[in-house]
Image (cartoon, grey):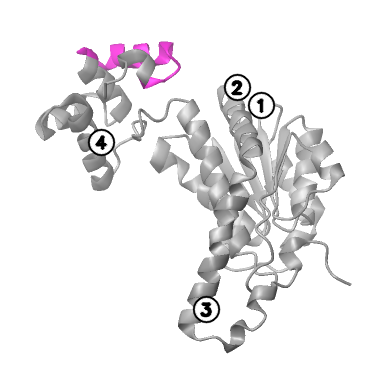
Amino acid sequence: MRDPRLTEQRNPRSRRIDRLSSAEIVDLINAEDRMVAAAVDEEREAIATAIDLAEAAFRAGGRLIYVGAGTSGRLGVLDAAEMPPTFGTDPEMVQGIIAGGYDALVRARDGAEDVSEDGAAAIDARDVGPEDFVLGIATSGSTPFVHGALARARERGAHTGFLLCTYPSRELLDRHDVVIAPLVGPEVITGSTRMKAGTATKLVLNTITTGAMVRLGKVYGNLMVDLQVTCRKLQDRGERILMEMLSVSREEARTLLEEAQGHVKTALVMGALGLDADEARRRLDEEGGVVVRVVGDLDA
């Protein structure tokens, strides 16, 4: 009997991949990957809803919590881990839960995804509540660990969403605040959802968190201004942002950063308006941290 899940079906275009040359394999995989962005675009409205849910959670003091197993879980943890260095967020703000725990990040834990009660326990351990948004990731749509986690999150009053790469059931659509289903089609290697489904997942998660952070004022123009200088790379990036936006020398930029205790957004407001660090922070707080509301458009 044919499996109804798209992620488990055979791809007719790759049935003879084992007879292809290396260059032909590259061409085939690349052709399949080109379908991913279009599938994600079809889900633009659902992804925008997820951005709004994440923003609302953050503004209420809540969190965005990803839940997944295997590749899906790893991608959730990865996206969460990238938020503090990119946007200067508290590590608690975006979190990732993976079936089997953090050991499963580097070595597959077979069977960890099959216990729904473990998913529920992971939600209890995070003390999930009404301010939080929990997004389950299961490209096949059937992972018990994820379903168990989302059921418990709903019981605890959280908003919930589901990301999958097969046709969502009516029950799934009715159960969650948002369902995102980019239909990337069967994988080049049957069932290997680390491929197109994994790529689609990464694109969707990138868009949700980036969109929410932009809405929160973590970005000015297209610059990562809400970063904290913690290493040479970020020091250089922070200085270059200030040099470009304020038309100052590197030394002046460095001085502003020092006075702002390494916070680029504060330094930008200080330099644009001639304020000290405390007053710059106060102005930013008044405007919800959105730089353009404080200094206007410096690119104009």
Q: The residue under label 3 is which amino acid type?
A: Ile
Classify mark 1: helix, strand or loop: loop
Q: The residue under label 1 is which amino acid type?
A: Glu
Is residue 8 visible to the viewer in this orientation of the structure? yes
Q: The residue under label 2 is which amino acid type?
A: Ala
Q: Which label's residue is closer to the chain start, 2 or 3? A: 3
Q: Are marks 2 and 4 in contact (CB under 8 Å)?
A: no
Q: Which label's residue is closer to the chain start, 3 or 4? A: 3
Which segment did they paint magenta?
A: 273-291
Classify mark 3: helix, strand or loop: helix
Classify mark 4: helix, strand or loop: helix
Q: Main secondary structure of the magenta part?
A: helix
Q: 215 or 71, which lies in front?
A: 215
Extreme-right residue of the structure: 1
Q: Are marks 1 and 2 in contact (CB under 8 Å)?
A: yes
The span from disc 3 to disc 4 (Cα, nearest Å) is 42 Å
Quick check: is 85 in the magenta stretch?
A: no
Q: Which residue is mark 2?
A: 60
Q: Which residue is mark 1?
A: 131
Disc 3: CA contacts within 10 A as few (<14), some (14-19) or many (>=20): some
Q: 143 or 101, which lies in front?
A: 143
Side of 125 where 266 appears, left or right: left
The span from disc 1 to disc 2 (Cα, nearest Å) is 6 Å
Q: Which residue is mark 3?
A: 25
The span from disc 2 to disc 4 (Cα, nearest Å) is 29 Å
